[in-house]
Amino acid sequence: IAYRYLAPPLLAVIVGYALYELAFDYHRGWWAWALNSSVALVYGVGFIVMTPQLFINYKLKSVAHLPWRFFLYKFLNTFIDDLFAFIIKMPTLHRVSCFRDDVVFVAFLYQRWVYPVDARRINEFGTAGDGGDGAGAAGAE
């Protein structure tokens, strides 16, 4: 579902970027322009690949299935990416793509803050967060 909503506007932005680069930026040849446009496409698709969990959280209005280890991993990954984006000399497009993790991480933090954790919700192991087993809740339906 994330692809259906994000792909068309992102594709339009990437095509616009490719046309802008073609008109206003210097390239050694057509191959260099095509390669730069392809890299922009890969970075854009990489952003879309990170967003389905945001849509799942929105649809469920819950983040009970996201453990704190996940957030620790995301925080460390985001911090290291940002650190290297500032320290290492790299192309501007790659530097900007390092900050796409930040956008997704901030959205995860916002969802963690807005959506309450429902302890009665049955997880993937068949148990509820309040210590009950899934059989009682499933039998009550």
Image: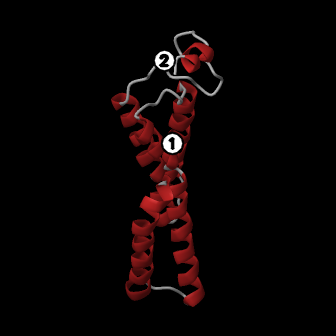
In front of the other: 80 or 9: 9
Category of crowding for the residue at label 2, using alpha-carbon neighbours closer than 10 angstroms: few (below 14), some (14–19), many (at least 20): some
Residue type at tag 2:
Arg
Looking at the picture, does residue 113 appear above or below residue 83? above
Residue 6, image quadrant: bottom left
Q: Position of residue 11 (x, y in %)?
A: 45, 71
**Image mark for residue 120:** 2
Residue 138 located left or right of residue 56: right
Who's the residue at 54% across and 88% down the image?
Answer: 28
In front of the other: 26 or 98: 98
The reply to whether residue 122 is in sight is: yes
Q: Position of residue 126 (x, y in %)?
A: 63, 22
Q: Which residue is mark 1?
A: 78
Residue 99 located left or right of residue 136: left
Disc nearer the start of the sequence (1/2):
1
Residue type at tag 1:
Thr
Label 2 element class: loop
Label 1, label 2: how far apart the Cα atoms are: 31 Å
Category of crowding for the residue at label 1, using alpha-carbon neighbours closer than 10 angstroms: few (below 14), some (14–19), many (at least 20): some
Who's the residue at 50% across and 40% down the image?
Answer: 79
Q: Position of residue 3 (x, y in %)?
A: 50, 59
